Amino acid sequence: MMELTVNSSEQFVIDTEKNEVSEYKLQITPRSRSAVIITVQGTKSARLDLDVSVGDSSDFTLLVINHNEAELEINERYSLYAYSKTVVAHCDLNGYDATVNSDYAFKEEGASLLVQTASLTSGKVRFNQNCIHEAGNSEAHVNNYGVVLAHGNCDMVVKNTIVKGAHGSSTHQTSRLLTYDKTSVGKILPVLYIYDNDVAASHAASLGQPDSDQLYYLQSRGLSYGEALKLIIIGYLLPITTVISDEQLGNTLKDEIEMKVGEACSM
């Protein structure tokens, strides 16, 4: 396991040709502002394990980009401390099988979390996300956006728990899956476990094929069916670019989304 203290910006490239299993333990320095970008690439099945401790009053962003051309399993565990602000983003546009298991524990009062995912797949993808508010006045927003292409499969299981005594906490989840056609399979399971009264909690989920009215409207403006479908899919995935403070990286992700969607819609 690689153990790192993080107090600035870091970038890691994991080559699955060299490492079938990669393990990182990240200690985010209290009262720091930092960002970590992890890119996974290669052609072999692999596993990435992350153990992240976000120090008090720190501002931390983690972006994981999956470019691996084989199955990838990600297991990540976060411990969030007092008044820290954490953003976790996953971008997976490859179309290969992938599983992301995420556990977020709010250890001390005032910690906040924003999770944003973007998935475009023709394989089998599964997100298992679990947020546990162990301390009061903590805040979570979990936002998942995915597009399931022909013959693809995507499951989203999102659990948010507020324990008894975690007064003033709020936890919210939004999961949206767009299925490309009748061969696309998607499933969303939103779960809330609330054991305290002085809290706010909500979930929203949508699953289905592109809206026919939206397609009709865009085609009435001169776009072909394929062009209209491409715009709708891009709009589904673009929110991940808004949570990245690095403008250049945000633009790079935007270009990649447009390219991958263009390739998918031309098949």
Image: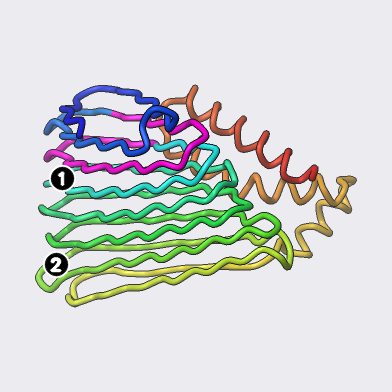
Measured as percent of width and height from the top left, residue 197 is found at 19, 77
Expressed as whole percent of the image width and height from the top left, the position of residue 248 reads 49, 22
Mark 1 is on which residue type? Tyr
Q: Is residue 253 left or right of residue 203?
A: right
Per the image, label 1 sits on a secondary structure element best described as loop
Magenta span: predominant SS is strand
- The residue that disc 1 covers is 83
Q: Amino acid at mark 2?
A: His
- The residue range painted magenta reads 35-63
Q: Tags 1 and 2 in contact by the CB under 8 Å rule?
A: no
Which residue does the numbered mark 2 point to in the structure image? 167
Is residue 121 magenta-colored? Answer: no
Q: Quadrant for the C terminus, please.
A: top right
x, y percent for residue 164: 12, 73
Q: Secondary structure at mark 2?
A: loop
Cα distance between the residues tagged 1 and 2: 15 Å
Residue drawn at x 14%, y 67% is 167
The spot of residue 168 in percent (x, y) is: 18, 64
Q: How is the image coloured?
A: rainbow
Which of the two labelled residues, at mark 1 and mark 2, occupies the earlier sequence position?
1
> What residue lies at 20% left-to-right and 34% top-to-bottom?
1
